[in-house]
Amino acid sequence: MAELILLALDESSTLALISRAFRAVGYKTAIAHNEAGVMKVMQESHPALVLVESSFHQEKSIGLIEKLLLEYPTLPIAFLATQNSPKLIQEALCAGVSAYLEPPLKTDEIVDAVKSSLKRARRIGDWVRQEVKHTTASLEKRISEMDILLTVGRDVTSNLDLDEVLKSVVSAAVKLTHAEEGSLLLLDEESNELYMRAGHNFEDGFVRSFRLPVTDTLAGQVIEMGEPLVLSKDSLLKIKTAYLVQALIYVPLRFKDRIIGVLGVDNRKHRLPFTDRDVLLISLLADYAAIAIENARLYQVSENERSKFETVLSNMDNALIILDEEERVQLINDVMCTALGIQPKEIYNKRIPEVILQSDFLSLLERKEDQKNQYHEINLDDDRVFNAQYTPIPGVGAAITMQDISYLKELNRLKDDFVHTVSHDLRSPLTAVLGYAELIERVGPINEMQKDFILRIHSSVKDITVLINDLLDLGRIEAGFDSRRETIHLGNILQYTLSNLEESIQKKKQALNLDIESDLPSMHGNPIRIRQLFDNLINNAIKYTPKGMEISIDLHLEGNQVIFKIVDQGAGIPPEDQPHIFEKFYRASNITASDAPSSGLGLAIVKTIVESHNGRIWVESTLGEGSTFFVVFPT
Ligand code: ADP
């Protein structure tokens, strides 16, 4: 097809002449009379060359040339100077014209200049096209390499099947380097041999039986040196006995500072050597393989840990449940499921109050703040009794553990029955002892020493009687035989108790601070037991507070509960004893029997009374400073 020459010349006789001359040698021509015309032809007809006359476009031809070359950098432009001006020529050359002509302008010279410009432009065009083709091909190759690497990378991070991942690494190595075979050899540290973990273009049997010593082998050399090995020689290379290759790459598989194996590709038939780029690609793939192997190892370690943890959980005797910070179930063992009669699947990730209805269990959660690590009894429908602890775990939530204490409860019940029977049976012989001791004086004269002994018998029998009465009381309240309830006024009972203890307080010269709220609401309760409760607590305060010190008693209403508080300046209770002082016969380690004769039953009775009135009791105490007992009754 004839090439188009755009003539940017002013209207003149030369224009027609030049146009005709071009057509005569086989070109087509187009004519533009202004800049807009030039641009229009450029866009619509893509001329092969533009001929610009210096006077064109009102002497702004250089500006037009610059504009054209900005938009079409490879466009050949021939410049016709209408006057002899070295400056103008220089400007045109600077703007980038490919040919220029000075007056006198001859048509055949113009045609020749255009022809040679076009020829050069064509050569440049061919070169550019070839370069583009070349670059495109190499870019396409890079993109396809990237694609393969990306796929392997994705496989490494998303696929947990190590066999598959390593197979894809080796296949990628073969594909990227256009090799004939590929293999991934791992080091068996025990035998100091390399075995094939994955292979490409090898028979399965060969892969399975492949073993290579580290010493005196090419792969072993890579393990020892930690550097890639690239070989292509005229003579055949021996990988192992009778296994010859023409060219090969081996790169080390490195994890941290350890070399765990070798990734390799080789050619057995073709002599074509591998390139540096091949080594780079294989090294990248070796990194992927090392990461995949390490990922698989870590996954296995965490799987083993998890399965160990699960075995421990399901084999432990204690019931366990782990909650997150919103009290949603995260983990539960079989013992807990059986105890609460639930299925793990039903409650996983659900909030406890939505899935567990057991009331004792729920009350443990309600009282978690003041029950940390303490005793909380859970009575199940099947008569089993568990002791539960709520333990907050920072950053996780909390753990609730429960132990079956049914057998301990049963033992306790047997012991209580026994104590109750024995106490009961002791009462009659004791009454006899007391009676006969009194009779001795009546039946004849006795000396002073005998009198003293009789007094001691009296006092001891009195102590035993108090103890027995305490035991029987406790048994009665615990057994629930003590259900008498009437309207009582705590303030009045407290005042009455205090009036009976006035003498003991005076004896020890102790100061008593009393603060009793005047119009406390009445409540339902057993007046005798409540008096016993006040009596025991105040008696303890007097007993354990040294002479001349202070005791403060406070009784007031707070919300819908009445709080009784007694503060003393006594010896205090060691922290390790505090959880136990409400148990029967328990005495704190800082008090010896001779300090204060006692049965160790007082607080056990107090606690049982408090609980039978739906109240709560606790102690706060600092050793050497004193103790405060709190009792809370619902109104
Ligand atoms: P006891 O008959 O021994 O007083 P309690 O059951 O009343 O028996 O008290 C149990 C133990 O608690 C006491 O032996 C004593 O160690 C400790 N205790 C009770 N009240 C006080 C107190 N106010 N100050 C110091 N220790 C006390």
Image (cartoon, rainbow, N blue to C red):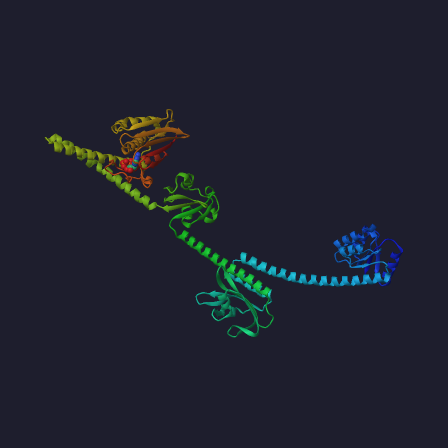
Q: Nearer the viewer, residue 230 or 114?
A: 114
| Residue 431: image location, x then y, percent | 19, 34
Image quadrant in which the N terminus is located = bottom right
Q: From where the camera sits, is residue 601 visible?
A: no
Residue 509 position by quadrant: top left
Task: Please tell me in which quadrant of the rendered image residue 619 appears.
Answer: top left
Residue 391 locus on image (x, y percent): 41, 44
- Looking at the image, which residue sits at the far right? 13
Inspect this view and state whether residue 42 appears: yes
- The one nearer the camera, 338 or 389, is 389
Q: How many marks?
A: 0
435 horizontally vs 560: left or right: left
Kindly identify the residue that appears in the image at 56 percent across and 74 percent down. 236
Left or right of residue 182: residue 460: left
**Nearest the camera: 259 or 312?**
259
- From this view, report whether residue 32 is shown above or below residue 560: below
Picture coordinates of residue 611 (x, y %)? 35, 35
Residue 548 sits in quarter? top left
Give percent across and percent down for residue 419. Answer: 26, 40
* Residue closest to the eye, 420 or 505: 505
* Image quarter for ligand 1: top left
Give left or right: position of 584 versus 190.
Answer: left
Q: Quadrant of the C terminus?
A: top left
The correct choice, above or below, for 383 with respect to 229 in the image is above
Q: Residue furthest left?
A: 445
